[in-house]
Amino acid sequence: MFNRLWTKTWRDLWQNRSRSLLVVLSIALSTFTLGVILNSYAVLSREMTQNFLRSNPTAISFSVERFDKDLLSKMKNQKGVGEVDARRLTSGSIRTNTGEWKTLLLFVVNDYNNIRLNIIKTDRGTWPPKKGQILIERQAVSVLKASLGDTIQLKNIYGLSTQLTMTGIAHDVGLPQAEWENVVYGYVSIDTLNLMGVDFYFNQLKISFDNQQLSESEMTAEASNYARWLENKGYQVNGYKVAAQGEHPHANITDGMFMIQKVFAILCCFLSAILVFNLMSAILSKQLGQIGVMKAIGASSKQISRIYYRGVVLLGLLGLLISLPCAYFVGNLYIDKLTLMMNIDISSYRIPIGIILLQILIGIGIPILSAYRPIRKASQLTIKESLLEYDPGVDTLGNSSFEKLILKLDFLTHPLRLAIRNSIRQKGRFILTTGVLMIATALLMASFNIARTMKQVVAVDRSAKQWALKISFDPTMELIDLERLLNEMTEIINTESFKRVNVSLFINDSEKISNKESHHSHNYQMGVVLNDLQLNSNMLSLPMIDGSWLNEPFTAELTQSSTTISPVVVSQLVMDRLPRLKLGGTIKVEIAGQIKILTVIGVAQNIGYPSIYSSELLSEERFKSNGLFISSNKQSKKELNQLKKEVISLAEKHGLKLRNVVTPWDASQVVEGHFNIIFSLMLLLTAIVIFIAANGIILTMTTNISERTRELGVLKAIGATGKVLASMVLTEASLIAILAWVFACLVTLPISYSVAYWLGILLIKTPLELTLEPIIFVISLPAMIAITGLASLVPMRKIMKLSVKNSLLYE
Amino acid sequence: MSNSIQLSNVSKRYRTNNTPFIALDRIDLSLEQGDFVSIVGKSGSGKSTLLNLMSGIDQPSSGQVIVNGIDIAHMKTNFLDAWRGKNIGLVFQFFQLLPTLTALENILLAMDFCKVISAAKRVDRARCLLQRVGISDKANQFPSLLSGGEKQRVAIARALANDPPIILADEPTGNLDSANAKSIFGLLTELNHQGKTIVLVSHDPDCHLYSNRSIHIIDGRITVNQKNAG
C-alpha cells in the first residue's frame, strides 16, 4: 500500500518536475527568509540580553551636575540600592584619520579595574588607559578610522586641542550605534582629562536595585525618590533615565526591525502558498481522469486525497531540505553582521529547537493548507465528473461582464484575442498569479515611494536650515572676533549668533496635584535642547506640524494673555514625551537652576534631538551666545564642506577655539544613514517577493501551455507558426503584468502610506508625509513586462519546439 | 441462478441548455450471474449510460439499480467506490491506465485500494493476472511503451485484481485493430467461462458471437433483449 501510493505521488511530481522545482524553490525561499529572520532573532535576542546582563546593567542613571566619590557610599546606603557607580561624561570633538572632525563622547571611570555597573571590558590593547592614552569603543573605531598606536587629535568641550595615543579598544555594551550616531566614544583616565584642560568630577550616577524583580513603574517611583533625596542633599539633578530590567537598550529597535522583516517573511510564505495552490490545482486538473479511474477501481476520496497530500508534504520537505541548512548558515552571517551593529559578543549560535520545529511546521503546514481546497475539490468529484475532465473555467467562459467585455474586443487580431481569452480561461489561477505579481509590484513601488519620502524628509530638514554652517563654541570665546573674521570671507553673506542650552523638561508636573503618589511629581527627562534665536531670525524655517513659527502671529488658542507669555516652538519629539501637551498649553523647564514656564505656540518637525525654539528668551547676562549661524552664497555639499574646512582653519590660525562646525548635510547624516539601511532592507525583501512572483508566472504559463497542448497542436495544424504561438504566450504574460501594474498602482498607495506613517512614528515620532516617486510608477510597468517576459522564456521555448503530431497525441 | 444485476423502471434524464434530454427511458432489465451480455446501439443511444448506472458511476433519475442484492442507486459515494472496487471490474475504451505506474503497479494499485487480497499475496496475484492475459513479460513497462492491445490486457488484468464477480466493459475493442479486438473478446469469453458476469458495450457487430444475450438500445429504450443461440 505504502509503496504504490508513494510511487504514484513521487512519479507525478517527477512528471511535473519543472513546476515542482519552482514550487520547491518558492517554499525553500520563503521558509529560508523566515528561517533567517527567526533564527537570527532568537539568537540575537538571547545573546543581547545575556551580554547586557553580563555587563551588570544600570537600573537608573542620574545626570547630576557635579559630584565626587563621597556620594557613592552615601547612595549605596540608601534603602533598596544594590550597586553604585559613577562616570564622568564630557563631549568634545576628535579628528579622524581622514581629517574630519567628529563628535567625541568621552568617558572617565574612577577605577577601570573595579567597574561595578555597565562594565566596560578591554577588547584589545592596553587596559586601563594611562596618562596621555585614549581607548576607543570598538564600534567607534570605524568612525575614527584609526588603528592602535595612532596619535589622535582631540578638542575638549572648550575647544582646546590635545594629542593622545590610541592604545586600546574597549567594549562597552549598550551604547548607541557609533556609526549611526556618527560619534566616537573614548575612555581616558582622570590624569588624561586634566591633561586635556578639563576639571575632573563625576556627572553620571548609576545605581542598580537589590530587588531585581521591580516593575518599571516601581523603578520610576524609586528613581523619583532618590532624585529628591539628591536634591535635598544639595546636588543638582538634571535628569534621570530608568532602564527596563534586563532589557538591552537596543531591544526595541531590534524588535521593530525584526517586526518589519517578519511581516515580509510571512508575506513570502503566503505568496508561496499561492504558488502551491496553483501547482496543485494545475496537477489535479490534469489528473481528473486518473482520479476518476482510481475511484472506478475502488479508491475512496480519502485515499486519493492522501496521494496528493503526500506530494505536497514531499514538496515541503524538499523545500525545507534546502532552506533549513541555508537559513542556519546565512542566519549566522546575518547575526555576525548585526552583532557588529549591536556591539555584542555571541557565545553560542544555538537555535532553540522550538524555532526549528516552527520552520518545519510552516514549511509543511502552509503547503498542506494551500493545497487543501484543490485536493478536496478534486477528490470529491464523482467518477463521471472526473472522467469527463470537468473544467469549470472553460464551461463558464463569457458569463461575467468582464469576460463579455473581453469577448467583444473584436478589433484585435485573432492571435491576440485568443491570448487574452486564454488568460481568463482559468480565472482562479489568473487572479492568483496576477495578485502575486501585483503584490510584488506594489511593494517595489512602495520601497521607492518610501525612499523618496525619506529623501524628501531629509531634504526638507536641510532646506529648513537656512544656514550654511552652524558653529558651536565656548561662551567664553569672544564672539565679536569670530564674526569679524568670518565677515571678511567673501563666501559668507551673514552671521547670526544664538544660544543653545540643555534644559530639563518636567514631564508630569500636572500630576502633582491630582496624582496621589506625590513622589511622581519630579520626573525629569534628559536631553532636551533649547535653541534661543535672535528676534526675527530667519536662519531656521522648520516645517510646521501645528501652530505658528516664532516670528509669525500666534494662531494657537492661548491660556494666558499673549503679552505675558514666553512663546516657544517645540519639536515633535518634545510633544512625543508630553502626550498631554496641546498647542497653546505650557511646558515647565529648568534652565540652569531656574524654572521657566513656556507657552507652546507651534510644533515643528525636526529630525534631530528633541528641541525647543525660542526668540530672545535667555536675555539675561549670564546666558552668553555659544553658537553662530553662517549664511553663504555656497550651496552644494562639496562647497560647504570646503567652507567648513576654511572656517576651522581660519579660527585655528587666530587661536579661536571652536567646539564643532557642521553643515546641514552633517546634521542629517545619522537619520539619512538609518533611512538608507531601511531602504536597502525593503529592496532586498521586495526582490525576494519578485522572485517568488516570477516563479508564479513561470508556473502559470507552463501549466497553461501544458493544459492546452492539444489545442496548440490544432493551431499549428491550421497554420500557426511557433513564433505566433510564442507571441501568444508573451501576450498572456504581458497581460498579467499590465493588470498587476494597474492594480499595484492603487494598492501601493495605502501600503506606502502605512509604511511612511509607522516608520515616521518609529524614527522621528511623527508620521512621514508620503511623497510618491513618479518614476517608479513609469519604470515598473516595463520592468514587470520584462520580468514576466523572462519568466515566459521557458514555456515559449517549449511551445516553439512543439510538433503537431506530439501535441495532438498529448495526454 | 440469482439475479446478478436488476434494473427496475430506470430512467435517466439530462438537461442541456435548458432542453430536457432522456438518455434512458423506463428500463427494466434483469441479468443473471454468469451471463455474458452485449449491449449494442448507435452513438448517443444510451448504452454507456446504462453501463454507468450498473457500475454506480452514474445515478438514475428514477428507478432502482440492484447489483448482487444491493441498491446502489442510494449508496453514499465513498461506500459505493469501495463496493465497486470489490464487486465490479471496469474496462474502458481508452484503457485508462495510470501513466506514471508500470503495468504491474497499475494492477497492484487496485488491490492496494480495496485490501481484499492480503498484502503478501498481491504481487504474486498481479503477476499471475498478467500471465493470464498473456503479457507477463510487460510487467515492468510503463503504459506509454505498450501497444493498444497490451494496454487493454493490462486494463482487464486490473479489472480482475480484486476478483470481482462482474466485469463491465465499455467499448473495450473500440480502439483496437481487429486481431486485437478478437483476442480481447476471447479473453472476456474465457473469464465468463470461469464464472464472471460480463456486460459488454460495443459497436462491434461481431460481439454477439461471444455473448449469450444481446440487448439493443435505440433512443434510450431497449428494443431487443434476447438470448443468443449457443
Image (tube, grey):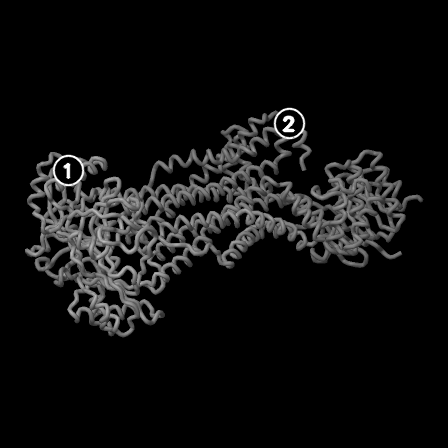
Subunit bearing disc 2: A
Question: What kind of residue is marked 1?
Answer: Ser
Note whether A318 is above or below A406 in the view shown. below
Front residue of A123 and A185: A123
Q: How crowded is the residue under tag 1: few (<14 C-alpha within 10 Å), some, or many (20+)?
A: some
Q: Which quadrant holds residue A421?
A: top right
Q: Same subunit under labels 1 and 2? A: yes
Secondary structure state at the residue bearing disc 2: helix
Q: Position of residue A396 (x, y in %)?
A: 58, 43
Residue A510 visible within the image: no
Front residue of A629 and A112: A112
Left or right: B48 in relation to A401: right
Secondary structure state at the residue bearing disc 1: strand
Front residue of A645 and A260: A645
First-in-chain label (1 vs 2): 1
Question: What kind of residue is marked 2?
Answer: Ala
Q: Which mark is residue A717?
A: 2
Front residue of A350 and A638: A350
Quadrant where the image shows the C terminus of chain B = top right
Q: Which mark is residue A205?
A: none
**Residue pictured at 46% horizontal, 34% vertical:** A785
**Residue pictured at 9% horizontal, 51% vertical:** A476
Left or right: A602 in relation to A721: left
Q: Position of residue A499 (x, y in %)?
A: 13, 51
Q: How crowded is the residue under tag 2: few (<14 C-alpha within 10 Å), some, or many (20+)?
A: some
Q: Which quadrant holds residue A110?
A: bottom left
Left or right: A10 in relation to A791: right
Q: Residue furthest right?
A: B230
Quadrant where the image shows the N terminus of chain B = bottom right
Q: Position of residue B203 (x, y in %)?
A: 80, 38
Q: Which quadrant holds residue B147?
A: top right
**Residue under pointer 1:** A632
